[in-house]
Image (spheres, rainbow, N blue to C red):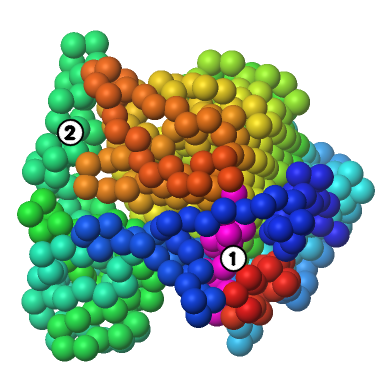
Amino acid sequence: MRKFSFVLWLSMLFLIFPCALFAQGTSSWVFFGPDGTLQYQTDDNGNRIMDFSFAGYQGGGVALPSVPVAVTVDPVDGDNTANIQGAIDSVSQLPPDQNGFSGAVLLNPGTYDVSGTLHIHTSGVVLRGSGSGSDGTILNMTGSPHLLLAMGGSGSWQTLGSAAAMTDSYVPSGSMSFNVDDASGFNVGDTVLVQRPVTDAWIQFMGMDTLMRNGQPQTWIKPGTMIRTDRVIAAIDGNQITLDAPLTDSFDSSLVNGSVIGYNFPGRISQVGVEHLSVIAPAVNVDISRPQFTGLSLSAVMNAWAEDVVFQDTQNTVSVSSTAKQVTLDNIQVTHTIDHTGDRMADFGVNGSQILVNQSSSNGTGEWPFVTQGEATGPVVVLNFNSSEQAGIGPHQRWFTGLLADNCTLPNAPAGVNGGTTGINFSDRGNHGSGQGWAVGWAVAWNVNTPFLVVQEPPGAQNWCIGCVGRQLSGKEPGSNNPVPDGNFDSLGKPVIPNSLYIEQLCERLGPGAATNIGYDGACASQ
């Protein structure tokens, strides 16, 4: 049974009965119209706060499955790595059912010493414990530092045929449709990559061509790099293509020449998960350059999940790569029993597309609770997340787009403007690292509660802080010390309706059953 902390319980109460706790305000960017549905303000170019509800398993609003047990494992004396991996491999050989599942490996209650990495590398396989509490399933990491569980396939996207060039002079962020020069080579249902090349013109426009560190020029993003958005074609009308989920970034033809191309991904697996167990690593304080005991990685995977998993004393605990799509991390708790010094590591590092992190936490001292990395597109939603760390939700580097921090509580994050440790930090990181520069665009903090908030406005883009409770801080670009304009602060100090942007968007797109499916029964304000 899921165990809620008081903070998570309070967040749930706030979500379902918001008026009982606070008198709420109204956002000028997203608000209920006369018909009782959400209306969206656009900027001069038509950009809007995107529909984030496509984040999560199966594209959002779908309950995590209960997969039948195929093999049961008991703990043995000594190392259990081969025993558990053998069970996973055995289930991997079973034929999948009509839903694509071969079965679950059930770990009975007890403690399992594990000295190596476990791999789920075949579709349809689930690793399930008997509970994340002390009387459930405990995986005790032993031996040399290693990753506990790698969940994913191999390879990357393989493009097909020729690309079609976008012909619109401007495609706003949040769009689901755009025009191309020739759509005849595409069909509804095709998997495609919307390609956004990094150009010298765009780098200069962003002011990222003058980054310096210790007298040496820094490279933010190398020209020619391709930022890809992984989508499916939902409709074609002449040369207009409509996608199955919104674009997170804008496409200005004066700066970038966008295109769309088909792909396949033969090495990517799907319908895999890990659930209902705890992981304990040795409590060590190591430098970021040293090997660490890490928790879970997801790459080359689609429609995957982790549910009700507790990690203790792992570092860089959960990592989601850019090749992961439609993933839910539900009730994932990371705790640290010792303080960590030196460079921070990330308890949650997310870089995939359509990712939902729900009712999860990061607690301890010396870690980043949640970061995104670079050159990737969401949507990524962090919903009802809390952390006692002295840091917050901070996109880390090199232009991630499409992040929503929704009803997050970060009470100990300090006023670390330059260091990026404020509770919300949507900023130009300047020459930090090796020129991390603008870390995020088109990001939203919605009804977040934290002492200090940094939300800055990138050239040609927007970031928002709506209904946030905390103190707005302004900053300068690290390295150059140039002032950076603030982003959009709307209803600062007064939470807004709807209480959860993600849940309300989900309700309006798929109906109240979608909210119920992910644990928020009765939370639809518009139903």
Q: Is residue 43 above or below residue 269?
A: above
Residue plotted at (47% across, 31% down): 472
Q: Is residue 488 above or below residue 275?
A: above
Which of the labelled discs sits on residue 503, or is there none? 1
Q: Position of residue 166 (x, y in %)?
A: 14, 69
Q: Position of residue 118 (x, y in %)?
A: 63, 50
Main structural element of the magenta stretch: helix, strand or loop?
A: helix
Sequence order check, earlier mark of 1 and 2: 2
Callouts 1 and 2 close, C-beta under 8 Å: no
User: Disc 2 marks which residue?
Assistant: 207
Q: Is residue 158 magenta?
A: no
Amino acid at the residue labelled 2: Gly
The residue carrying pointer 1 sits among few (fewer than 14), some (14 to 19) or many (20 or more) residues within 10 Å by Cα, namely many
**Image quadrant of residue 268?**
bottom left
Residue plotted at (32% across, 22% down): 476
Residue plotted at (21% across, 73% down): 178
Q: CA distance from mark 1 to mark 2?
A: 36 Å
Q: Is residue 148 visible?
A: no
Q: Position of residue 477 (x, y in %)?
A: 30, 24
Amino acid at the residue labelled 1: Ile
Q: Position of residue 176 (x, y in %)?
A: 31, 72
* Numbered range of the magenta stretch: 495-510
SS class of the residue under badge 2?
loop
